[in-house]
Image (cartoon, rainbow, N blue to C red):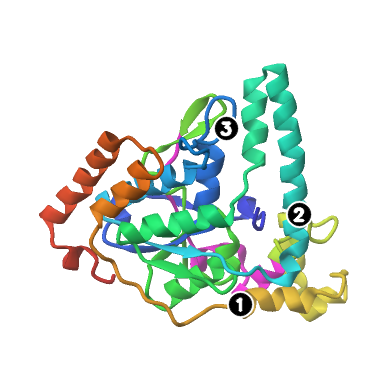
Amino acid sequence: MGVQISELIKSKEIELELLSGKRLAIDAFNWIYQFLSIIRQKDGEPLRDSSGRVTSHLSGLFYRTINLLEAGIKPIYVFDGEPPELKRKTSDQRRDIREEAKEEWKRALERGDYEEARKYAQRATTITDEIIEDSKELLCAMGIPVIQAPSEGESQCTYLVINGDAWAIASQDYDALLFGCPRLVRNLSISGKRRRGDSYIIVKPELIELKNVLDELGINQTQLIILGMLVGTDYNPGGVKGYGPKKALELVKQRKTLDKIIEEINFNGESEAIFNLFKHPNITKKYNIEFKQFDENKVKKILCDEHDFSEERVENALKRISEVGKEKSLDVFFRKK
């Protein structure tokens, strides 16, 4: 869900070529959720292998990562760890929404309403431990770095960017800005299109730079966190009643500090804890970023032997990345930038 401040944020459409040669820290859960939601059959069922195991995430990860590498982009996937206790309320709400959506999905199928069925099926999306482990195994076989965050993936991604190990975060959510990430890339889809109902719309990657955001809004990083808290974050869903993005911005500019804002509105006693989750997130400074050679045999074993992917399609994708390796040495291709 993330913080809902999109109406305040100005982004800049960019061409994919701008990202060539750059390392991007990818919020893995954010992308996997996308794949599980979007890559579905007409009736809303996700892709499955002959054993009934979900494979939508593997399809999305494999082909999008191939496309990224082919475009010269160096992905680093960061996986969420244990969520903070304050996120429990959000997690419970999301679980309830998924359970309700599952029931509506069943009813839509019984009516033969496949359009509604697909819509509710997307809302019922769940990321399981098996999906996470399958994703990590595939990425490692592809030679892609995987980092396990101790808590929130976006805060760990932010540290990678601030520390110079990545150029930007790739995520659809704006939370990275509250964590202090200098650059956020949205809509990183090589296809240049996104499904909307039964049709597609053209989309381009968007670059959001934190400095520009703060300058445009006339606030500092600390005040951006407070603004997010007023609107609502994953740690206080719904925010403060009566405060949308514009009204929250006005209050932050007037009162300026958290202490002064607390004098005016009620955060239910959790304001300091929420603020500190963004200001001092739980991250690890111990990680290894190493791009390795593709293990083509292992990739084919995972996708084709274990999950019934088309061997021809997988081999064609592998040939494309092999051509990239021929054009330039992998040492140069994966050099830190």
The percent coordinates of residue 78 (x first, y second) are 47, 65
Q: Which residues are magenta?
A: 202-227
Q: Nearer the viewer, residue 22 or 326?
A: 326
Percent of width and height locating residue 142: 31, 57
Q: Nearer the viewer, residue 105 or 212?
A: 105
Give the quadrant of residue 265. Answer: bottom right
**Sequence-first tag of 1 and 3:** 3
Q: Is residue 203 magenta?
A: yes
Q: Which residue is tagged 1?
A: 281
Mark 2 or 1: in front is 1
Image mark for residue 54:
none
Reply above or below: 8 against 60: below
Asked whether, in this view, residue 215 is left or right of residue 109, the answer is left
Amino acid at the residue labelled 1: Pro
Q: Which secondary structure, mark 3?
A: loop
Q: Exactly how many numbered labels are in the figure?
A: 3
If the image is split into quadrants, where does the C terminus sit?
bottom left
| Residue drawn at 25 percent across, 57 percent down | 295
Report the residue marked by disc 3: 45
| Residue 315 percent coordinates (x, y) | 24, 41
Residue 244 is labelled as: 2
Q: Amino acid at mark 3?
A: Glu
Q: Which tag is nearer the camera, tag 1 or tag 3? A: 3
Residue 157 percent across, percent down from the top left: 48, 68
**Element at badge 1?**
loop
